[in-house]
Every structure is written in C-alpha cells, then in structure tokens.
Amino acid sequence: MDRDAVEQILRDYAALRRDDTDPEREAVRAAILIEDVFGVTLSDADFDPAVLADASAVAALVARLRRAV
C-alpha cells in the first residue's frame, strides 16, 4: 500500500469523526485503526494525538514503522 492509499484511508476515517469527541479518545480510536488496517504496532512514543489527527503525519509514521519491520 503506497502513501497515497494510506492518506486516502485516513481522510475517509477523518470524514467520519465527530467534532465533539474528546481528542484523547479520538487518538485511541485512530491508533486502533492504524494498527488494525496497516498492520503496524504503535509504541507509547508514537501515541501523539496531534500526529494521529493529521493524515500526512500518520502516513509518514506508518511508512517509518513498516520500514522498521
């Protein structure tokens, strides 16, 4: 899966989010999605709500984690 596909999945996911959701809770949901869909494992250091809310930043994170495997 290339970076564009990763970003498209994340944009689709972001379109489903509700604005009234707690940012920390939304970050947990995003982390679960990322781990399940992209087959990577996030460490505590990777769990940053600001990063997990940005499709481009997550795409870069997924690419980095895939290279590490």
Image: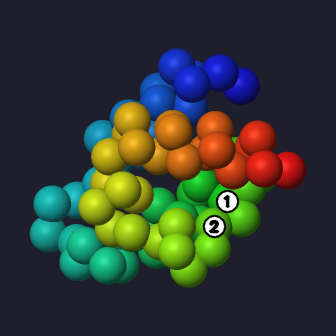
| Quarter holding residue 23 | bottom left
Disc assigned to residue 35: 1
Identified by mark 2, the residue type is: Leu
Q: In the rendered structure, which disc, 2 or 1, sits on the residue that comes first in sequence? A: 1
Amino acid carrying mark 1 in the image: Glu
- Pick the front one: 66 or 19: 66
What secondary structure is marked by label 2?
loop
Q: Residue furthest left?
A: 20
For disc 2, the marked residue is 42
Q: Could you tell me residue 12's position as x and y percent? A: 41, 35
Query: Quadrant of residue 13 in the image?
Result: top left
Q: Is residue 55 left or right of residue 43?
A: left
Mark 2 is surrounded, within 10 Å at the Cα level, by few (under 14), some (14 to 19) or many (20 or more) other residues, namely some
Q: Is the residue marked by circle 1 packed among few (<14), some (14-19), or many (20+) residues within 10 Å?
A: few
Residue at 47% across / 46% down in the picture? 58
How far across and down, in percent of the image, does residue 10 sit?
45, 40
Residue 20 locus on image (x, y percent) = 14, 69
Please identify the quadrant where the N terminus is shown. Answer: top right
Residue 9 in view: no
Tell me whether the residue at label 2 lies in contact with that at label 1, contact meaning CB atoms closer than 8 angstroms. yes
Query: How far separated are the C-alphas under marks 2 and 1?
Result: 7 Å
What is the x, y in percent for residue 41? 71, 64
The mark lying in front, picked from 2 and 1, is 2
Give the residue at x 63% y 67%: 42
Q: Is residue 54 visible?
A: yes
Image side of residue 8 versus residue 66, left or right: left
Residue at x 32% of width, y 46% of height:
54
Q: Please, what secondary structure does the residue beneath circle 1 have? A: helix
Picture disc at residue 52? none
Q: Residue furthest right?
A: 69
